[in-house]
């Protein structure tokens, strides 16, 4: 027999598993089989227990918010297993539709659906449920756009932004080093703030300075920063910071606590406004209030775009910024039409009307290539071009 919806307590917020149709599945095609009658491991606080399997603190915080939003509760410890088991695919579909009605981005909706899916994957592993009501085959997620909506700074705007930082003060030297590294290394906000001194500042195989970066999913990667201006900016900041172990970039509390992410947002807005980048302010459709479209991630987006524009291979950029797929990196390109046009133009002349090379021309090209491949005679004198007056 299918489980009956749990009764709603007076004053409790509405959510899946409460209200009309919740848990009934709406139609027979969307009804779920009853949970296993025996053999399931004991689960007392399912939502809270599901979060313990994640290593990333950011993932835990995000998924906790998504659980509370989906179930309409303030405290996950009060969310019982019986209530969670009343959820049907129709409840998840209604949640998806509500998020889309709020004009949230497809990427955000996908992330929230992934959170709900992860909860039921955990319960399936514990033997508490047989079917995941948030499975992609049961609840279709909106498709993400191939073009990122992050407002990246242009090259000129990035220069103006960095020039707006006063490097005559200790805080200015700290902020300049932080934002310069973000603009030239493509760090995520959480990555730059989680760097620790001195253990995350290392030497690469060739002696070049590298950062040990902890990315999403606790994956680590090495990011080189051996360019002279980056090294000098970091050295100037470290001269003020001192050698105390702890977080590389910290606030007034000292190196035992990282710089707060909300403070990083405020700094981004402060320097953008000082640089005259007021066009990066937008309006929220619902409230009409001013809203900053520019945030720390804009420097990362600019880095990826500049590197692609400069012809750096996409796989090298992908590894540098910690993406798992080339498609994610290419998603930061602001205009796919331009990229496609560049690829086509690179093959200009490849048609039936093009003049075919004659045999002598091909022989001359082969001789030139052979000269380039042949090493110079070690005994021959160096050819020095005479200096012109």
Image (cartoon, rainbow, N blue to C red):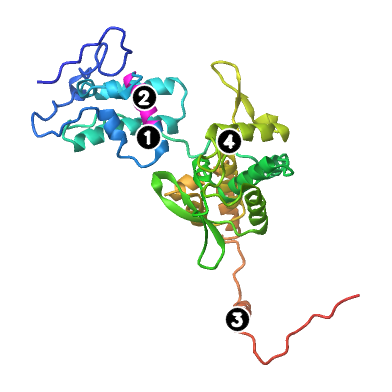
Secondary structure of the residue carrying tag 2 is helix
Which residue was labeled with disc 4?
A: 264
Q: Residue at x 17, y 21 (%)?
A: 28
Q: Is residue 132 left or right of residue 221?
A: left
> Depth check: 198 or 218 in front?
198
Instruction: Name the image quarter holding the N terminus.
Output: top left
Mark 4 and mark 3 in contact? Answer it, CB < 8 Å: no
Q: Residue at x 27, y 33 (%)?
A: 49
Q: Is residue 266 left or right of residue 20?
A: right
- Whether residue 136 is visible: no
Which residue was labeled with disc 3?
A: 363
Counting residues from the N terminus, which is met first, the one under dot 3 or under dot 1? Answer: 1
Q: CA distance from mark 4 to mark 3?
A: 61 Å
Which residue was labeled with disc 2?
A: 96
Number of the front mark, 2 or 4:
4
- The percent coordinates of residue 226 (x first, y second) are 60, 59
- The percent coordinates of residue 184 (x first, y second) are 61, 50
Number of the front mark, 4 or 3:
4
Is 248 above or below relative to 366?
Answer: above
Counting residues from the N terminus, which is met first, the one under dot 2 or under dot 4? Answer: 2
Over which residues does the magenta segment extend?
62-72
Within 10 angstroms of label 1, few (less than 14), some, or many (20 or more) residues? some
Q: Which mark is residue 60?
A: 1
Q: What is the residue that sits farthest to the bottom in this orientation?
A: 379
Looking at the rendering, which quadrant does residue 40 occupy?
top left
- The percent coordinates of residue 93 (x first, y second) are 32, 23
Q: CA distance from mark 1 to mark 2?
A: 20 Å
Question: Does the stretch in magenta take in 134?
Answer: no
Mark 4 and mark 1 in contact? Answer it, CB < 8 Å: no
Secondary structure of the residue carrying tag 3 is helix
């Amino acid at each position: 027999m299918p489980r009956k919806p749990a009764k709603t307590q007076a004053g409790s917020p509405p959510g899946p598993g409460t209200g009309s149709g919740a848990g009934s599945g709406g139609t027979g095609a969307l009804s779920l089989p009853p949970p296993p009658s025996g053999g399931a491991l004991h689960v007392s606080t399912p939502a809270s227990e599901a979060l313990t399997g994640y290593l990333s603190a950011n993932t835990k915080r995000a998924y906790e918010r998504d659980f509370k939003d989906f179930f309409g509760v303030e405290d996950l410890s009060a969310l019982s297993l019986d209530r969670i088991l009343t959820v049907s695919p129709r409840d998840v579909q209604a949640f998806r539709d509500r998020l889309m009605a709020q004009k949230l981005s497809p990427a955000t909706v996908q992330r929230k659906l992934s959170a709900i899916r992860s909860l039921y994957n955990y319960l399936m592993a514990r033997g508490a449920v047989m079917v995941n009501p948030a499975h992609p085959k049961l609840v279709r997620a909106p498709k993400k756009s191939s073009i990122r909506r992050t407002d990246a700074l242009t090259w000129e705007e990035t220069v103006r932004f960095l020039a707006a930082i006063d490097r005559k003060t200790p805080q200015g030297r700290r902020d300049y080093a932080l934002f310069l590294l973000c603009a030239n290394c493509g760090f995520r906000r959480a990555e730059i703030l989680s760097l620790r001194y001195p253990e995350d500042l290392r030497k690469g195989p060739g002696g070049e300075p590298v950062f040990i970066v902890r990315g999403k999913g606790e994956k680590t990667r090495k990011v080189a920063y051996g360019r002279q201006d980056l090294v000098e900016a970091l050295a100037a900041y470290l001269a003020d910071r001192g050698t105390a172990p702890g977080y590389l970039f910290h606030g007034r509390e000292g190196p035992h606590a990282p710089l707060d992410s909300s403070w990083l947002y405020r700094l981004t807005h402060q320097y953008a406004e000082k640089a005259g980048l007021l066009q990066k302010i937008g309006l929220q459709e619902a409230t009409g209030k001013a809203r900053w479209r520019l945030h720390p991630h804009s420097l990362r987006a600019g880095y990826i775009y500049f590197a692609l524009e400069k012809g750096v291979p996409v796989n090298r950029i992908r590894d540098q910024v910690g993406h798992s797929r080339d498609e994610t990196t290419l998603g930061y390109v602001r205009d796919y039409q331009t990229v496609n046009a560049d690829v086509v133009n690179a093959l200009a002349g490849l048609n039936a009307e093009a003049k075919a090379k004659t045999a002598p021309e091909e022989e001359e090209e082969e001789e030139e290539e052979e000269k380039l491949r042949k090493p110079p005679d070690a005994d021959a004198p160096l050819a020095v071009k005479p200096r012109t007056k």
